[in-house]
């Protein structure tokens, strides 16, 4: 079956512009995660959606970052007034349930802020 | 906050050599996963260990979960260039807590 997809694969934007990154999780997966990865380093947790529960936003670095998940499926990560330090690969993952279940990752969106 | 420290951060060795990567924490985990990430792709799960002291083998890869479930190791025998990648451990807390990912080990196998 189809895996996790993300779009766009690459995004170049000017400092100060807003960007939206999209994630289509595996159908039926109730948990969805957003991570940020800089220069091939480890994963920085951003936000976690699990079913109808309130999202865990504890990893969002500033109020310029927000995310929503519509209808328990597609998710959009929005970065407002982008800064150069926002440049990174943004990875989305989904899981059949929350907690310690295996996470399936998308290929990521490489964001470059010029 | 649960933290998972991996060591070494970077490792570059010759093809055919053996290596071990460590994943350490002061926290107890209900289970621990290892992922491998190749350039341009997302991480992919290699194994999950759930019992203290558990050892799992995946071809040339051997994974061990510490007796106290606070640490884990990944041993690769006779490394191949295809083993090159970023290795991430991830610990699962109890209940519905999200996974905590380790700091990562970037492995390069030189042909």
Image (cartoon, rainbow, N blue to C red):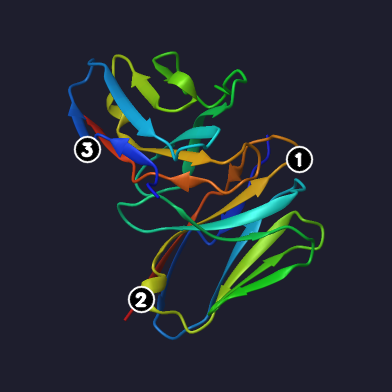
Disc 2 to disc 3, how far (Cα)?
Answer: 28 Å
Badge 1 or badge 2: first in the primary sequence: 2
Disc 1 residue crowd, few under 14, some 14–19, many 20+, Cα 10 Å? some
Q: Nearer the viewer, mark 2 or mark 3?
A: 3
Quadrant that contains the C terminus of chain A? top left
Residue found at x 53% / y 80%: B60
Q: Tell me the residue that label 1 is attached to.
A: B94
The answer to whether residue A114 is seen in the rendering is no
> Is B55 above or below relative to B24?
below
Q: Nearer the viewer, residue A38 or A67?
A: A67
What count of labels does the image hold?
A: 3
Q: Tell me the residue that label 3 is attached to.
A: A10
Residue A77, quarter of picture: top left
Disc 2 residue crowd, few under 14, some 14–19, many 20+, Cα 10 Å? some
Callout 3: helix, strand or loop?
Answer: strand
Labels 2 and 3 touching (C-beta < 8 A) = no
The chain under label 3 reads: A
Residue found at x 57% / y 58%: B34
> Is A44 above or below relative to B36?
above
Q: Tell me the residue that label 2 is attached to.
A: B81
Q: Nearer the viewer, residue B42 or B76?
A: B42
Residue found at x 43% / y 45%: A105
């Amino acid at each position: 079956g189809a895996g996790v997809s993300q779009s766009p694969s690459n995004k170049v934007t000017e400092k100060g512009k807003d960007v939206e990154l999209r994630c289509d999780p595996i159908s039926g997966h109730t948990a969805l995660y957003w991570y940020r990865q800089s220069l091939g380093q480890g994963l920085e947790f951003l936000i976690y959606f699990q079913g109808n529960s309130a999202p865990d936003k504890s990893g969002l670095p500033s109020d310029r970052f927000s995310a929503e998940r519509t209808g328990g499926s597609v998710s959009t990560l929005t970065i407002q007034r982008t800064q150069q330090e926002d440049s990174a690969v943004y990875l989305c993952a989904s899981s059949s349930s929350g907690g310690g279940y295996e996470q399936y990752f998308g290929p990521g969106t490489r964001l470059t802020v010029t | 906050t649960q933290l998972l420290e991996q060591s070494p951060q970077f490792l570059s060795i010759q093809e055919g050599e053996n290596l071990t990567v460590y994943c350490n924490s002061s926290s107890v985990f209900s289970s621990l996963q290892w992922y491998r990430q190749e350039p341009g792709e997302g991480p992919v799960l290699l194994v999950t260990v759930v019992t203290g002291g558990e050892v799992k083998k995946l071809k040339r890869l051997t994974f061990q979960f510490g007796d106290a479930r606070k640490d884990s190791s990944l041993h690769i025998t006779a490394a191949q260039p295809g083993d090159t990648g970023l290795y991430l451990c991830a610990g699962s807390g109890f209940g519905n807590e999200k996974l905590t990912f380790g700091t990562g080990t970037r492995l390069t196998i030189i042909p």
